[in-house]
Amino acid sequence: MQFEHAHGFRPQVPMMLQAEWPAALKGWQDLEARPVEAANPDGSRQLVGMLSRRSTFERALRGAAEMQSGLTLRAGHVEELVVERGRVTGARVDGALVEADLVVDASGRAGRLGRSRASGDTRDLDGDCGLAYVDRTYRLRPGAEPGPMSSPIAYVAEFDGYQCLVFLHEAGHFSVVVVRPTADAALKDLRLETAFEAACRAIPALAEWTHPDRSQPTSPVLVGGALRNVYRRQAGTPGLVAVGDSVATTTPTRGRGIAMACMQVTALLGLLDEGADPVAVAEPFGAWCDRAIEPWVADHIAIDGGMVRRWQGEGLDLNVPLTSDLIADAVQADPRIGEHAGGYFAMTALPETLRPAEPLARAVYLSGWRPAYAPGPTRDELVDVIRATEPAA
Ligand SMILES: Cc1cc2nc3c(=O)[nH]c(=O)nc-3n(C[C@H](O)[C@H](O)[C@H](O)COP(=O)(O)OP(=O)(O)OC[C@H]3O[C@@H](n4cnc5c(N)ncnc54)[C@H](O)[C@@H]3O)c2cc1C
């Protein structure tokens, strides 16, 4: 269940709740979720995320929904959508009909309702991201300080052949994630507790976070499911609208999924508030998703493919357009790129806004500059660390 896996929350999430459902935001903060701000160059402060476990977020939303007047909660399995004269008029839930003016398909990445919707629109996107991951949750001991961070909400670092992330959550909880190419079978054993612990000891930043004096594990090592980058257009059936992962899923490595779902909620409610007909709202909403959501999925497909190839030893190909992660990385060598990158990092401007900086980034890479790996074992050295934990044959 993804709700137990590591999650980071971008500012779009608390901002949407503040605007649309303040009781849920309050409930989240009552469960100790903490907003994080950072200083802007002009000295003003800006919200950059929320520290929380995903399960805490879910508890807060559920609690607020239970208290919401006018809302009836029913738990059950939606077996099928009910269609009458070309219009969705409800859903069959555990055998019973639930009628609706508008059915919202929020069935997520594995929802079957969405699958029947997307009957082969050739403009849809779908690609295996080529990445696999394991993660584990921990909690800081009373009084212990967090370990190294690379941003106010997380530690994210690229190594020679793999990637590590640490998400700080509420009340000293945190998650450690190790991402590898799916094809790299030798790193698969990181799913074993002894191997994962040895890897954490060998990677300096993770060693600091997970040192027994600082923290203790609160879960076994969790193995992530198959990760795909998917964009599905609206089905076009009146009375039905899809939102969230049912529209778009991206590799979790950039923590975009819930932010994209919240951006969709804001857009959908905005259309309805402006008077859009609920039965037909999927059409303007779908057009908005094509403009504002699809580019993030396309961006991920490009980024992930290049990242996996580089982790597997391929050199940087300067004969093709640079992907946005490479353009953004080059800001370390040419600060002018930063003028184009802020909106991209914050997801307040589409990936295309980075394009004007591509020639600057290209010049950086042509000069021979490459982003430095974080201090720690290479992939081959990490394989040795893992093998050393295996019992002798
Ligand atoms: C391992 C992992 C890590 C992630 N990390 C991050 C992160 O750091 N930051 C971030 O922003 N995003 C992250 N994401 C993405 C994020 O989890 C999703 O974008 C988000 O959960 C989408 O919400 P949703 O409500 O659309 O779908 P979901 O959260 O998947 O909810 C869909 C629900 O519908 C239910 N359902 C499906 N079919 C039916 C049916 N027929 N009847 C009844 N119920 C049904 C499912 O059981 C599920 O409970 C991560 C995802 C994964 C897998």
Image (cartoon, grey):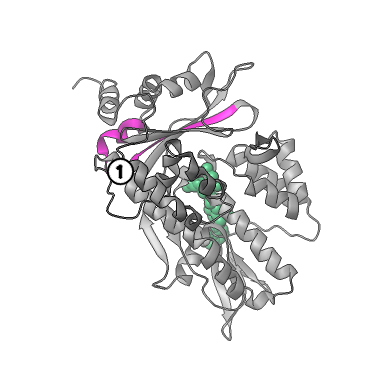
**Membership of 182 in magenta stretch:** yes
Q: Is residue 2 visible?
A: no
Q: Is residue 349 left or right of residue 171?
A: left
Residue 382 visible to an observer of this rendering: yes
Relative image position of residue 8 (x, y in whole percent): 56, 40
> Residue 184 falls in which quadrant of the image?
top left
Identify the residue at image location x=69%, y=43%.
Answer: 60
Q: Secondary structure at mark 1?
A: helix
Determine the residue positioned at 64% across, 59% down: 265
- Specify the amino acid type for callout 1: Leu
Foreground residue, 96 or 41?
41
Q: Is 60 or 354 nearer to us in this picture?
A: 354
Residue at which label 1 appears: 366
Question: Residue 236, relative to residue 182: is it above or below?
Answer: below
Which residue lies most toward the right here?
A: 69
Q: Is residue 126 magenta?
A: no
Residues in magenta?
Answer: 173-190
Query: With 380 as the anchor, is 285 left or right in this view?
Result: right
Q: Looking at the rendering, in which quadrant would you find the C terminus?
A: top left
Where is residue 121 drawn, in percent x and y? 42, 73
Write down the quadrant of residue 105 in the picture.
bottom right
Residue 177 image position (x, y, % from top left): 44, 34
Q: Please, is residue 218 above or below residue 132 in the view?
A: above
Can you name the residue that lies furthest to the top here? 213
The crowd level at tag 1 (other Cα within 10 Å; few <14, some 14-19, many 20+) is few
